[in-house]
Amino acid sequence: MFQPNQRDPTMPVLVNMAASVDGLKLLEKCPSEKLDSLLHEVIDGICGHCRPRLQDYSRVWTGEVWFQVLDACQTWIKNAVKNGLTKDGMEKDLENLPAEIQRRLVECVTVRRGDIRASLLADTAAISQAHLKDFDWKLKLALSSDKIASVQEPLLNVDFNVQEGDHNKTVSLEMDRQELNKLIASLETANKAVLQMKT
Amino acid sequence: MEEVDNIIIHTFRQIGCDIEEDVVSLRQFSTELIIKATVRCLKIIDDSTSLPLTLPPGMSARFRMGTDLANALVSLGYKGEMGYQTFLYSNEADIRRVLMFLVEKLPKDTAVTSDEPLGKSALLSRSIAACIADQIQTPWLPPCCKKRGIRWRTPKQWNREGASGAHLYHSVAVTVPSGLDDLSRKIPKEVKSYYSKALPLVSQQPPRHEDTAASLLETNAAEVTAAQEWETEWNSVGLQSRLTQQEYKARKKERLQKKIATQLQQDVQKAEAGGVTAAGGAADLLQFLSNFSDKTPGKQQGKGSRFTHTSKLQFAQDDDKAISQMGIGEGVPKADTEEEQRQKREDEQQGLRDQLTQLTNQMDGLELDMKKFTAGIQQMEEQKNLEERSSEEKNDAYRVKKRTMDLLPDAENNIAKLQGVVESSAQRLVSLAKQWEKHRAPLIDEYRTLKEQNANKESESLKKLEDIQELRDRMKEVVDETRGKEELHKQLVSEYERMTKDVNRSAYTRRILEIVANIKKQKHEIQKVLVDTKTLQKEINHMSGKLDRTFTVTDELIFKDARKDESVRKAYKYLAALHENFDQLIKTVEDTGSIVREIRDLEDQIETESNKKTIANLQKITADYKEMKKENATLIAKVKGK
């Protein structure tokens, strides 16, 4: 059945791959001793760690080209992991590149496949409108109030770090003991539901 | 007595009486001190007691206070003799008894709380109070003097001020080399080089340095919870499936993937069904559209929401209208009035509507025809099948009949032959059956034994599974138990450490033990003395009996001879005198003993009396008496003066 509103899913990948392979050619400029660390840093960036910095490579590329290189590397690596390419598949994909760069790229992806896959999966699992990224809590003890001299009530302050689209939002809650119990109970039921889905 | 005094003095010090260091026994207690201690105890036992802590100056007031104290003690349940004199003119033994009673009456926990009185919450609130007081007292410092909001008090003590050094808890997935603990497994070369060269340190992995701790905590927590979850699942479900862990995991993965796939398929189907109905609703409209004008492009047929179609329809109409208007504007002068235009449009509409109804009617008819034809085709096919079957049957019958017809001419021979064939085949059947039987019996036996073995193995494995489950449970139990015991041990150790600070306690217990040992020894000695006394008594009885008997025998002998002989008579007299004298002697000795005992008793009494400070008390009493007289005199003088 023909679907006018949907683009052909295979098309953009091919286009991207071609573009990224073009961009990957720029890697030839990179001195070979820096290539490994650059690729690993790119992968680190995908996994949410430190990204590579231009100042470390400013002798090799100018700013504009630098971003092209980064983009190309990222898209190619992501696609390679996403499509589950084997070693041969990756080599075939990189046919046009020099053998040294080919080898390095393939090696990096095979070594870090697990990490990249995990981060891509996390991104995919977060497709809903808003999702919880992190939470933080601190316990406070209210000693007294303006009316009562000695309150001695523990209060829990929970910060939920929620990601909505591209920007983070922090939702802060202050709860006393009962409210906290309620929250924990609801979280436990949610966990139970997840466990049921898992089995 | 020393022990008791020590305990009493110690307790008094604990409840807040300032007793000087050199006071070691109750003998050194002054009247003021006694009164003070007693009132303090009474106050602790019963809060509502309203007695002053010091003796009032007036003599009569003193007596009144003494009686009040005595009454309070009696109302507490003191059994002994009690009056104002107990306090005002004290003697050691009485005071000791009273104070011991009071110390026993003291609520136990106050004795404990004064030493280590604080629960955790009280300790916490106290430390909070101390901290706040500290912070209130310290002078203000400009923020630039506090790096990251930390103020150093002493080289080792610091506290945070303000929120300048605080940051959110934000975690990042952290990569840690894995598989290094198992030396027997080889790590691939590339992975090794990655670990050694490219993998940054954990502290450098998060984009912001502050996130390191949070990331590490988070990663660890995630791993721990995952391991726990797996453990419980493996224990509850995994073991019973009797697969290895890898197999179980693979199977679970397969199952989950299948589940997800079916879910997705269902959803897609549902979505498609929804789309089709929408499209079906719009289908006639589309047809109408394509009929109406050729402008709507062909590729817009098919899927799409009702909304898009209607909007397209509107646009198409608008386009058409615009074009017609433009055409009108170009060709014909502006003579056409609105009326005419409307008329024209209505006509057009009517025409189109007619066309539409005509077309739909036509289509309905065609559809009906189509249905009829398809039904006809089915019927025909069924009929055809029936015919084919019947023709086959007929063919079979024809073949059999033809054979029999062929055999008919030489009937007898053929019948004999047939009989022979039948017999031989019957024989063959019998022999085959025998052979089958021969083969079958051992096979069946084998089958049965195998089945039995299988069942045995099954039950055995079941048993083993149960054993494993039990062992796991036991392991868990034991682990819990050890953990609990370790905790208990820790708690007890800390408690013990806290307790050793209280030297008195161990000293008391040691002394109590010593006292008990002493008492035992003394008891033993008393027993010994008692036995000695008994043996002595026995000996004395024995001796006196012997003496009596000897005396009677001698008396008789001499008495018999005394009649005959004068000298013997003298001897008899001497004997009697001797006996009497000795009797007297014994009596005197006994009397002496009892007198000595009395003397000792009296001495004891004297000692106790002298212990009671009678003379001093007497002097005090006379002094107080004189004081009273003086007071009375002044009072009388006052009265008279008035």
Image (tube, rainbow, N blue to C red):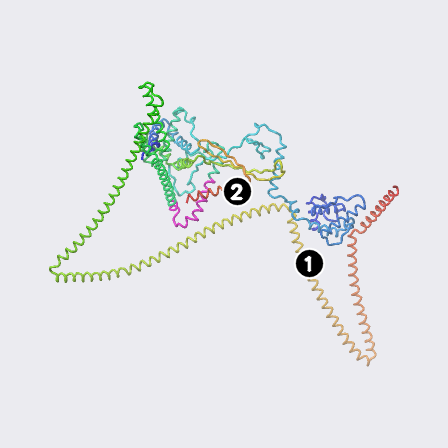
- Whether residues under marks 1 and 2 lie with C-beta atoms below 8 angstroms apart, the answer is no
Residue B612: image location, x then y, percent: 78, 52
Label 1 environment density (alpha carbons within 10 Å; few <14, some 14–19, many ≥20): few
Q: Is residue B310 magenta?
A: no
Residue B39: image location, x then y, percent: 73, 46
Identify the image quadrant of residue A111: top left
| Residue B636 or residue B81, whichever sits in front | B636
Label 2 environment density (alpha carbons within 10 Å; few <14, some 14–19, many ≥20): few
Provide the residue span drawn in magenta.
Answer: B220-249
Tell me which amino acid carries mark 1.
Gln
Query: Which residue, given by chain and number where applicable, does mark 2 sit on?
Result: A181
Q: Is residue B230 magenta?
A: yes
User: Which structural element holds mark 2?
Assistant: helix
Which residue of the protein is positioned furthest toward the bottom in this rendering?
Answer: B564
- Residue for point 80% across, 50% down: B617
Tell me which amino acid carries mark 2.
Asn
User: Which structural element holds mark 1?
Assistant: helix
Residue B539: image location, x then y, percent: 72, 68
Query: Which residue, given by chain and number where applicable, does mark 1 sit on?
Result: B522
Q: What secondary structure do most residues of the magenta stretch adopt? A: helix
- Residue for point 43% across, 38% down: B177
Do marks 1 and 2 share a subunit? no
Q: Nearer the viewer, mark 1 or mark 2?
A: 2
Question: Is residue B510 rendered to the left or right of residue B223?
Answer: right
Residue A12: image location, x then y, percent: 34, 31
